[in-house]
Image: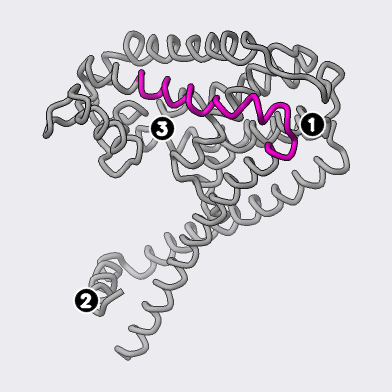
Amino acid sequence: MTEEEFERVEQSNGQMPGIEERKVEIVVKSGDKFSFIVGVLGLIGGQYLALRYPELFPYFYTICMVALVANRYPLFASEKCQLFMIDFCYFMNLSTIIQIIFYPNNLLWFKANYVLCMGSLLNAMVVWQNSVIFHSMDKLTSLLLHAFAPFTVHLYRWGVIPCQAITAEDHLTLVELVVIPFLMYMVWQLLYLVVVELLLAEMIKKDPELSFSLRHLATDTNNGMHQLVTNIMRNIGVMQPKEVFNAETVKTKLIFIIAQLLYTVITVIPVPLLYISYNFSLVYISAIFGWTLWRGSCLYYQDFQDRYQLEFLKKKKD
């Protein structure tokens, strides 16, 4: 942080009356503290249940997800982002919760959840650049939406959470790996299109500030998926060299629908090996979880560095 940046921070801070500024700061800090406490206690509590009372872990997962999603909705609604909550990750968490709570011995449903959770959801932590940031409830929620379900089905698969229907010698057939999971995926995709293209089409058209996955991916040029799809489409001639996405056109919608389907197919490729090899599954999950820890540590380090520089410049100015 340069001295000029420090001056801008000082000037921006001076735009708000002192009392109001302190009130906002207190509220923000209190929220961060609460999120940090919840995150750390949740991590410790989840590990304790998984190791000591694994039969209770599905209920812990369910309660956490319901609480996190309920807490997120008012925030997303205020920011006109509530349609993000019909994305595939929410659908898969709902499917996993219903299956493990009400139909724990339905092996076909469990395997379909396993394939999609260990494939699409687990890798989404990398695609969406999730980070372990305990003091941010929003970042913590995004991380757990992608991490909780894969971790839960992993515990079921390897007998940590007992289930009569699942045996260590089991494997995935072609139908269990491809047909049933992708039928589930198509059900979600059709429901998603019905909501955004039929039921809420008029509202979406009238409100350009309303954000949802397709609109976000089409407009966020810093998003990795946006950049990847753009480069591929231009290289194969589907898009002109300087053409950009327009979320309102059929062309853009079809491109991202197909792109997400291809992403899901690619992420499913290692799942058969994950299902039959505990060691590979453990390394695979640890690598992705470790990546989110690394991102979190980098963000924390950058934040501490900025704070140190700000404090140093402040003392220098004094």
Q: Quadrant of residue 6?
A: bottom left
* Residue name at image x 58 percent, y 59 percent: 33
- On residue 82, the disc is none
Q: Looking at the image, is mark 1 or mark 3 earlier in the sequence?
A: 3
Please give left or right for residue 90 compared with residue 311 in the image.
Answer: right
Camera-side mark, 1 or 3: 1
| Cα distance in 3D space between marks 3 and 2 | 36 Å
- Disc 1 target residue: 158
Q: Quadrant of the N terminus?
A: bottom left
Task: Name the residue type under label 1.
Answer: Trp
In terms of secondary structure, where does tag 3 sit? helix
Please give left or right for residue 242 compared with residue 181 in the image.
Answer: left
Magenta stretch prevailing secondary structure:
helix
Q: Looking at the image, is mark 2 or mark 1 earlier in the sequence?
A: 2
Camera-side mark, 2 or 1: 1
- Disc 2 target residue: 4
- Disc 3 target residue: 77
Camera-side mark, 3 or 2: 2
Q: Looking at the image, is mark 3 or mark 2 earlier in the sequence?
A: 2
Spot occupied by residue 287 in the image (x, y as percentages of width and height): 60, 47
Look at the image and give the residue range highlighted in magenta: 257-281
What crowding class fits label 2: few (fewer than 14 Cα within 10 Å), some (14-19), or many (20 or more)?
few
22 part of magenta stretch? no
Task: Name the residue type under label 2.
Answer: Glu
The foreground one among 91 and 207 is 91
Task: Name the residue type under label 3.
Answer: Ala
The foreground one among 232 and 130 is 232
| Cα distance in 3D space between marks 1 and 3 | 39 Å
Spot occupied by residue 302 in the image (x, y as percentages of width and height): 43, 66
